[in-house]
Amino acid sequence: MKKALIGDIGRYAVHDGPGIRTIVFFKGCPLRCPWCHNPEFIADRPESAFFPDRCIGCGECRDLCPVAAVEVDKIAGINRSRCTGCGLCAGSCPTKALELVGRRYDVEELTNILLRDRLFYQTSGGGVTLSGGEPTAQLAFCGELLQRLHQQGIHTAMETNGFFAWDEFKTTCLPYLDLILFDVKIADRDRHRVVTGIGNEVILANLQKLLAVRADDVIARIPLIPGFTADNENITRLAALLKELMVRRCSLLPYHPYGLAKVEKIGGTQNNTLPQKPMNDRVLHEWQCFFTDFDIVEP
Protein backbone atom coordinates (compact mmCIF):
# COMPACT_ATOMS: atom_id res chain seq x y z
CA MET A 1 0.00 0.00 0.00
CA LYS A 2 1.27 3.48 -0.89
CA LYS A 3 2.60 5.62 1.94
CA ALA A 4 3.38 9.33 2.05
CA LEU A 5 5.64 11.34 4.30
CA ILE A 6 3.43 13.85 6.12
CA GLY A 7 4.87 16.72 8.14
CA ASP A 8 1.72 17.69 10.01
CA ILE A 9 -2.07 17.67 9.92
CA GLY A 10 -3.71 20.98 10.83
CA ARG A 11 -7.36 20.88 11.90
CA TYR A 12 -9.92 23.72 12.03
CA ALA A 13 -8.12 25.95 9.51
CA VAL A 14 -10.06 28.81 7.96
CA HIS A 15 -7.60 29.73 5.20
CA ASP A 16 -6.41 27.92 2.07
CA GLY A 17 -9.88 27.23 0.79
CA PRO A 18 -13.51 27.87 1.82
CA GLY A 19 -15.02 27.00 5.18
CA ILE A 20 -13.43 25.05 8.03
CA ARG A 21 -10.68 22.84 6.66
CA THR A 22 -8.10 20.26 7.56
CA ILE A 23 -4.69 20.96 6.02
CA VAL A 24 -2.39 18.05 5.20
CA PHE A 25 1.22 19.22 5.06
CA PHE A 26 3.21 16.91 2.83
CA LYS A 27 6.93 16.78 3.53
CA GLY A 28 9.34 17.42 0.68
CA CYS A 29 9.59 20.27 -1.83
CA PRO A 30 11.78 20.73 -4.94
CA LEU A 31 11.99 24.53 -4.47
CA ARG A 32 14.17 26.33 -1.96
CA CYS A 33 12.39 29.64 -1.42
CA PRO A 34 14.29 31.68 1.20
CA TRP A 35 11.05 33.00 2.72
CA CYS A 36 9.32 29.63 3.11
CA HIS A 37 6.73 29.73 5.89
CA ASN A 38 7.10 25.99 6.49
CA PRO A 39 10.84 25.26 6.24
CA GLU A 40 10.40 22.14 8.36
CA PHE A 41 8.50 20.57 5.45
CA ILE A 42 11.12 21.17 2.73
CA ALA A 43 13.36 18.12 3.22
CA ASP A 44 11.91 14.83 2.00
CA ARG A 45 12.92 12.92 5.13
CA PRO A 46 11.93 12.89 8.82
CA GLU A 47 13.79 15.46 10.94
CA SER A 48 14.11 16.22 14.63
CA ALA A 49 13.09 19.75 15.56
CA PHE A 50 14.78 21.16 18.66
CA PHE A 51 13.20 23.69 21.05
CA PRO A 52 16.07 24.79 23.34
CA ASP A 53 13.82 26.75 25.72
CA ARG A 54 12.16 23.47 26.73
CA CYS A 55 15.36 21.47 27.27
CA ILE A 56 16.38 20.55 30.85
CA GLY A 57 19.62 18.81 29.84
CA CYS A 58 18.65 15.41 31.27
CA GLY A 59 20.55 13.44 28.62
CA GLU A 60 17.81 10.89 27.85
CA CYS A 61 18.04 11.71 24.15
CA ARG A 62 21.83 11.34 24.06
CA ASP A 63 21.71 7.94 25.76
CA LEU A 64 19.15 6.56 23.30
CA CYS A 65 20.56 7.90 20.03
CA PRO A 66 21.94 4.94 18.01
CA VAL A 67 24.28 7.12 15.90
CA ALA A 68 25.57 9.46 18.61
CA ALA A 69 24.01 12.48 16.90
CA VAL A 70 22.84 14.11 20.15
CA GLU A 71 25.29 16.05 22.29
CA VAL A 72 24.41 17.44 25.72
CA ASP A 73 26.22 20.20 27.54
CA LYS A 74 23.81 22.34 29.54
CA ILE A 75 21.20 21.65 26.88
CA ALA A 76 20.99 19.18 24.03
CA GLY A 77 22.19 19.77 20.49
CA ILE A 78 21.88 17.71 17.31
CA ASN A 79 24.68 16.86 14.92
CA ARG A 80 22.62 17.11 11.72
CA SER A 81 25.27 15.37 9.61
CA ARG A 82 24.81 12.20 11.70
CA CYS A 83 21.09 12.34 12.47
CA THR A 84 19.01 9.75 10.59
CA GLY A 85 15.62 11.04 11.75
CA CYS A 86 14.72 7.83 13.56
CA GLY A 87 12.81 9.77 16.21
CA LEU A 88 14.06 7.88 19.27
CA CYS A 89 15.29 11.12 20.86
CA ALA A 90 11.96 12.84 20.35
CA GLY A 91 10.06 9.89 21.76
CA SER A 92 12.15 9.90 24.92
CA CYS A 93 12.16 13.65 25.66
CA PRO A 94 10.13 14.36 28.83
CA THR A 95 9.68 18.07 28.03
CA LYS A 96 9.04 17.79 24.27
CA ALA A 97 12.21 19.76 23.53
CA LEU A 98 12.72 17.38 20.62
CA GLU A 99 9.91 16.62 18.19
CA LEU A 100 9.99 14.43 15.11
CA VAL A 101 8.77 16.19 11.98
CA GLY A 102 7.59 13.70 9.40
CA ARG A 103 5.63 10.47 9.67
CA ARG A 104 4.53 7.99 7.01
CA TYR A 105 0.82 7.35 6.55
CA ASP A 106 -0.98 4.98 4.23
CA VAL A 107 -4.03 6.24 2.34
CA GLU A 108 -6.59 4.45 4.45
CA GLU A 109 -5.21 5.71 7.76
CA LEU A 110 -4.96 9.30 6.56
CA THR A 111 -8.42 9.23 4.98
CA ASN A 112 -9.96 8.02 8.24
CA ILE A 113 -8.26 10.85 10.15
CA LEU A 114 -9.53 13.44 7.69
CA LEU A 115 -13.09 12.14 7.80
CA ARG A 116 -13.29 12.71 11.56
CA ASP A 117 -14.19 16.35 10.89
CA ARG A 118 -16.73 15.65 8.16
CA LEU A 119 -19.45 17.43 10.17
CA PHE A 120 -17.40 20.65 10.29
CA TYR A 121 -16.82 20.47 6.53
CA GLN A 122 -20.50 19.97 5.81
CA THR A 123 -21.79 22.73 8.09
CA SER A 124 -19.21 25.33 7.00
CA GLY A 125 -18.75 24.50 3.34
CA GLY A 126 -15.19 23.42 4.13
CA GLY A 127 -13.08 20.41 3.31
CA VAL A 128 -9.51 19.20 2.99
CA THR A 129 -6.52 21.06 1.52
CA LEU A 130 -3.30 19.33 0.51
CA SER A 131 -0.32 21.57 1.19
CA GLY A 132 3.29 21.28 2.22
CA GLY A 133 6.09 21.25 1.38
CA GLU A 134 4.78 20.34 -2.04
CA PRO A 135 2.03 17.70 -2.31
CA THR A 136 2.71 16.98 -5.98
CA ALA A 137 6.14 15.65 -5.01
CA GLN A 138 4.10 12.60 -3.90
CA LEU A 139 1.63 12.60 -6.79
CA ALA A 140 0.48 8.98 -6.80
CA PHE A 141 -0.44 9.10 -3.13
CA CYS A 142 -2.20 12.45 -3.56
CA GLY A 143 -4.27 11.05 -6.39
CA GLU A 144 -5.47 8.09 -4.38
CA LEU A 145 -6.21 10.22 -1.32
CA LEU A 146 -8.13 12.82 -3.35
CA GLN A 147 -10.16 10.11 -5.05
CA ARG A 148 -11.23 8.66 -1.70
CA LEU A 149 -12.17 12.09 -0.32
CA HIS A 150 -14.07 12.89 -3.53
CA GLN A 151 -16.03 9.66 -3.21
CA GLN A 152 -17.04 10.74 0.30
CA GLY A 153 -18.31 14.10 -0.99
CA ILE A 154 -15.52 16.11 0.68
CA HIS A 155 -14.49 19.42 -0.93
CA THR A 156 -10.84 19.16 -1.94
CA ALA A 157 -8.18 21.78 -2.58
CA MET A 158 -4.46 21.75 -3.28
CA GLU A 159 -1.75 24.33 -2.74
CA THR A 160 1.03 23.85 -5.27
CA ASN A 161 4.17 25.54 -6.54
CA GLY A 162 3.31 24.21 -9.99
CA PHE A 163 6.45 22.13 -10.50
CA PHE A 164 4.98 18.75 -11.42
CA ALA A 165 4.58 16.31 -14.29
CA TRP A 166 1.45 17.55 -16.07
CA ASP A 167 0.28 14.27 -17.60
CA GLU A 168 0.43 12.44 -14.27
CA PHE A 169 -1.19 15.32 -12.39
CA LYS A 170 -3.97 15.57 -14.98
CA THR A 171 -4.92 11.92 -14.63
CA THR A 172 -4.26 11.21 -10.94
CA CYS A 173 -5.24 14.43 -9.15
CA LEU A 174 -7.12 16.93 -11.29
CA PRO A 175 -10.38 14.96 -11.67
CA TYR A 176 -10.75 14.90 -7.88
CA LEU A 177 -9.82 18.51 -7.09
CA ASP A 178 -12.41 21.24 -6.54
CA LEU A 179 -9.90 24.08 -6.10
CA ILE A 180 -6.26 24.63 -7.06
CA LEU A 181 -4.22 27.34 -5.31
CA PHE A 182 -1.34 27.89 -7.71
CA ASP A 183 1.70 29.90 -6.59
CA VAL A 184 3.34 32.23 -9.12
CA LYS A 185 6.43 33.82 -7.62
CA ILE A 186 8.82 35.33 -10.17
CA ALA A 187 8.27 36.14 -13.84
CA ASP A 188 11.87 36.01 -15.07
CA ARG A 189 13.18 32.50 -15.69
CA ASP A 190 16.78 33.11 -14.64
CA ARG A 191 15.83 35.11 -11.57
CA HIS A 192 13.41 32.36 -10.56
CA ARG A 193 16.22 29.81 -10.79
CA VAL A 194 18.62 31.92 -8.73
CA VAL A 195 16.08 32.55 -5.97
CA THR A 196 14.30 29.17 -5.74
CA GLY A 197 16.84 26.79 -7.27
CA ILE A 198 14.56 25.89 -10.20
CA GLY A 199 13.51 27.72 -13.37
CA ASN A 200 9.87 28.59 -13.95
CA GLU A 201 9.38 27.07 -17.42
CA VAL A 202 7.54 23.97 -16.19
CA ILE A 203 5.56 25.99 -13.66
CA LEU A 204 4.23 28.52 -16.18
CA ALA A 205 3.52 25.81 -18.75
CA ASN A 206 1.50 23.89 -16.16
CA LEU A 207 -0.42 27.02 -15.19
CA GLN A 208 -1.33 27.64 -18.83
CA LYS A 209 -2.49 24.03 -19.30
CA LEU A 210 -4.48 24.13 -16.09
CA LEU A 211 -6.24 27.36 -17.03
CA ALA A 212 -7.16 25.88 -20.39
CA VAL A 213 -9.20 23.13 -18.75
CA ARG A 214 -10.20 24.40 -15.28
CA ALA A 215 -9.88 28.20 -15.23
CA ASP A 216 -12.83 28.70 -12.86
CA ASP A 217 -11.22 26.47 -10.23
CA VAL A 218 -7.77 28.09 -10.18
CA ILE A 219 -6.61 30.88 -7.88
CA ALA A 220 -3.19 32.22 -8.82
CA ARG A 221 -1.34 33.32 -5.70
CA ILE A 222 1.56 35.75 -5.56
CA PRO A 223 3.71 35.92 -2.41
CA LEU A 224 4.77 39.52 -1.78
CA ILE A 225 8.30 39.12 -0.42
CA PRO A 226 10.43 42.28 -0.01
CA GLY A 227 13.73 41.90 -1.81
CA PHE A 228 12.62 38.80 -3.73
CA THR A 229 9.23 39.17 -5.42
CA ALA A 230 7.69 42.48 -4.28
CA ASP A 231 9.29 44.98 -6.64
CA ASN A 232 7.86 46.96 -9.55
CA GLU A 233 9.66 45.04 -12.28
CA ASN A 234 8.60 41.58 -11.12
CA ILE A 235 5.06 42.51 -10.15
CA THR A 236 4.50 44.38 -13.42
CA ARG A 237 5.62 41.35 -15.40
CA LEU A 238 3.55 38.96 -13.31
CA ALA A 239 0.42 41.10 -13.64
CA ALA A 240 0.88 41.29 -17.40
CA LEU A 241 1.47 37.54 -17.57
CA LEU A 242 -1.63 36.69 -15.57
CA LYS A 243 -3.72 39.04 -17.68
CA GLU A 244 -2.35 37.45 -20.87
CA LEU A 245 -3.21 33.98 -19.54
CA MET A 246 -6.69 35.27 -18.63
CA VAL A 247 -6.39 34.29 -14.98
CA ARG A 248 -9.80 34.87 -13.44
CA ARG A 249 -8.82 34.91 -9.77
CA CYS A 250 -5.63 36.07 -8.09
CA SER A 251 -4.68 36.33 -4.44
CA LEU A 252 -1.81 38.36 -2.99
CA LEU A 253 -0.02 36.82 -0.02
CA PRO A 254 1.64 39.48 2.18
CA TYR A 255 5.01 38.67 3.68
CA HIS A 256 5.15 37.42 7.26
CA PRO A 257 8.35 36.32 9.06
CA TYR A 258 6.61 33.19 10.31
CA GLY A 259 9.24 30.80 8.98
CA LEU A 260 12.32 32.57 10.35
CA ALA A 261 12.09 31.14 13.85
CA LYS A 262 11.19 27.68 12.61
CA VAL A 263 14.20 27.27 10.33
CA GLU A 264 16.64 27.31 13.24
CA LYS A 265 14.75 24.54 15.02
CA ILE A 266 15.64 22.13 12.22
CA GLY A 267 19.28 23.20 12.08
CA GLY A 268 19.00 25.86 9.38
CA THR A 269 20.14 29.47 9.34
CA GLN A 270 17.88 32.50 9.02
CA ASN A 271 18.12 34.55 5.83
CA ASN A 272 19.34 37.92 7.12
CA THR A 273 17.92 39.80 4.13
CA LEU A 274 14.33 39.02 5.11
CA PRO A 275 12.45 41.57 7.24
CA GLN A 276 11.72 40.71 10.86
CA LYS A 277 8.26 42.28 10.70
CA PRO A 278 5.23 41.41 8.55
CA MET A 279 4.19 43.55 5.59
CA ASN A 280 1.99 46.40 6.77
CA ASP A 281 -1.52 46.99 5.47
CA ARG A 282 -0.59 50.17 3.61
CA VAL A 283 2.01 48.41 1.44
CA LEU A 284 -0.33 45.51 0.81
CA HIS A 285 -3.07 47.92 -0.26
CA GLU A 286 -0.69 49.58 -2.74
CA TRP A 287 0.01 46.24 -4.40
CA GLN A 288 -3.69 45.38 -4.42
CA CYS A 289 -4.44 48.65 -6.23
CA PHE A 290 -1.69 47.85 -8.71
CA PHE A 291 -3.39 44.61 -9.68
CA THR A 292 -6.77 46.28 -9.84
CA ASP A 293 -5.31 48.58 -12.49
CA PHE A 294 -4.59 45.44 -14.53
CA ASP A 295 -8.23 44.35 -14.05
CA ILE A 296 -7.06 41.45 -11.91
CA VAL A 297 -8.90 41.27 -8.60
CA GLU A 298 -8.76 39.06 -5.57
CA PRO A 299 -11.44 36.40 -5.12
Image (cartoon, rainbow, N blue to C red):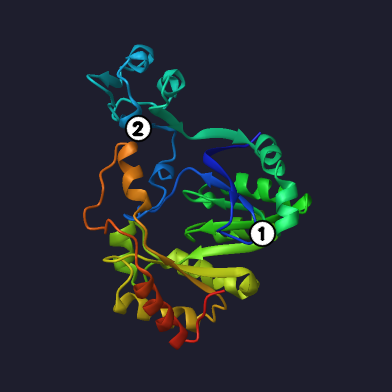
The residue positioned farthest toward the top in the image shown: 63
The residue at the point 63 percent across, 60 percent down is 170
Q: Is the N terminus in the top left, top right, bottom left or bottom right quadrant?
A: top right
Task: Please give left or right for residue 30 compared with residue 229 in the image.
Answer: right
Residue 221 percent location from the top left of the image: 48, 67
Circle 1 sits on which residue? Answer: 177
Quarter of the view holding residue 126 = bottom right
The answer to which of marks 2 and 1 sits earlier in the sequence is 2
Residue 62 percent location from the top left of the image: 33, 16
Q: Is residue 179 above or below residue 1?
A: below
Task: Return the residue nearer the eye: 248 or 57.
Answer: 57
Q: What number is the disc on residue 30? A: none
Q: In this orientation, does residue 48 appear? A: yes
Question: Disc 1 residue type?
Answer: Leu
The residue at the point 25 percent across, 44 percent down is 269
Please, what secondary structure does the residue beneath circle 2 have? loop
Q: Is residue 62 above or below residue 233?
A: above
Instruction: Tell me the CA gap for discs 2 and 1.
Output: 37 Å
